[in-house]
Each structure stands twice: as C-alpha cells, then as structure tokens.
Image: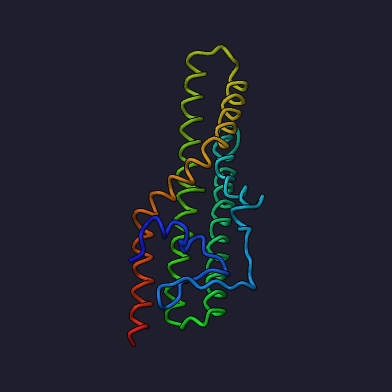
Amino acid sequence: MLHATDYHHHTLAHQTASTIMSSTNSVIKDSDMCVTVDLYRDTPLRLLGYANEVGEAFRNQMHVRSVYATYAVATAYCIGDMIDKTWRTQQACVDGNIPETHMRTKMMATAADTLLWQAFASVIIPGFTINRVCHFTGKALKTYSKYAPQRQKMITSAIGLSVIPLIVKPIDHSVDFLMDNSLRLLYANDVLAASDKKSHD
C-alpha cells in the first residue's frame, strides 16, 4: 500500500526519466540519468504559467481579447508541461523495460495529474485570485480616492502585479496538498493495481 506521504515524493506528476515504479511496487532508479532540473517548473519558462495573472492585472487597461490571449499562453504552457512529463514517463518506462500495458497506464496517470495540477495551480486559482484583487481594489479606489480614473487603473494594475509573487508558492503547495490527499491516491492505486496484476500473470 502506497501512503500519501510517500507518494508525495514519488508522484507521477513530478516523475522524471530517472525514476519510475516497477512491476513489483518498488522504485527503479537509472544511475546514468540524473534529471535534477524540471524545465517547466524550475526555470524561467515557469513564468509563462503566470501570463494569465498578468492579463488579469491589466484587464482594466486592455481589450478583453488581449486578456484571453494571456490565458492562451498559460494554457499552452500547461499543455507543454503535460507533454514533457508524459514523454519523460514513457522514456523511463522504456529504459526500465516496463511492459507496454503498464507504460500506458503510467503515461495516462502522468498526463492527467500534470494537466490537472497546472490547470488549478497556474491558471484557474491564481487567475481568479488576481481578478478579484483587482476588482475590489478598483472599487475601493473609485469609492474612496480622488485619483483620476486612469491613475486608479494604473494603481489597480500595480497592486495586482505585486500580489502575484505572494500567491504563487501558497497556491502551488495547496494544490499539491489537495491532490496528494485525493486524486493522486487514485492514480497511485491504479498504477499499483496494474503492476500487481502483471506480477501475478
């Protein structure tokens, strides 16, 4: 039985080409492959995931189509991360001589987990948060300040942008925690069930 605390460190969403679960429920590690940097989460490429938050911060100053365009960028980033993680899982399974049936199960679990995590941590929750921050900031300035409308918009955008760095880690960790204790338990059980079935064939 794989516990949630253990699975947090071996979750399929963060699985690299050097670490996979074998058919005997153990972890195979390829010493010749040391992947220590996640391109989509540990490099500046991660900033693309925040494109929609920037769009929300400037919603009051640009056409709504431009805001939608920032969501398109963030969504493309999420899909790119899903493809990258799924490909790494496939390569790890091939290198570890994992049967094709099990490989497909692991790949589907990785794709689903990665896309769900990115959707909530990079697009939905932060986008909604910045939208609300800017909405209420704008209302407060309009009601209580004597600034000109354009200055109110600039202040609102500045506050929205300043909030982004403050919400990234809390949201990331919250989504991880929620998924570790819910959906990821199902993914783990599915993979282990497939592995157990093969080991008894």
> Image quadrant of residue 54?
top right
x, y percentage for residue 36? Answer: 62, 60
x, y percentage for residue 117? Answer: 46, 54
> Would you place residue 105 above or below residue 144 in this image?
below
Residue that sits furthest to the bottom in the current view: 201
**In terms of depth relative to the viewer, which is nearer, 191 or 132?**
191
Q: Residue at x 59, y 15 (%)?
A: 147
Q: How many marks?
A: 0
x, y percentage for residue 154? Answer: 62, 26
Q: Residue at x 35, y 53 (%)?
A: 181
**In terms of depth relative to the viewer, which is nearer, 54 or 14?**
14
Left or right: residue 99 versus residue 52 is left
Q: Quadrant of the C terminus?
A: bottom left
Q: Quadrant of the N terminus?
A: bottom left
**In terms of depth relative to the viewer, which is nearer, 167 or 158?**
167
> Would you place residue 157 above or below residue 201 in this image?
above
Q: Residue at x 54, y 60 (%)?
A: 79
**In terms of depth relative to the viewer, which is nearer, 60 or 178?**
178
> Would you place residue 145 above or below residue 162 in this image?
above
Q: Residue at x 57, y 69 (%)?
A: 18
Residue that sits furthest to the right in the current view: 44
x, y percentage for residue 29? Answer: 55, 71
> Would you place residue 15 above or below residue 103 in this image?
above
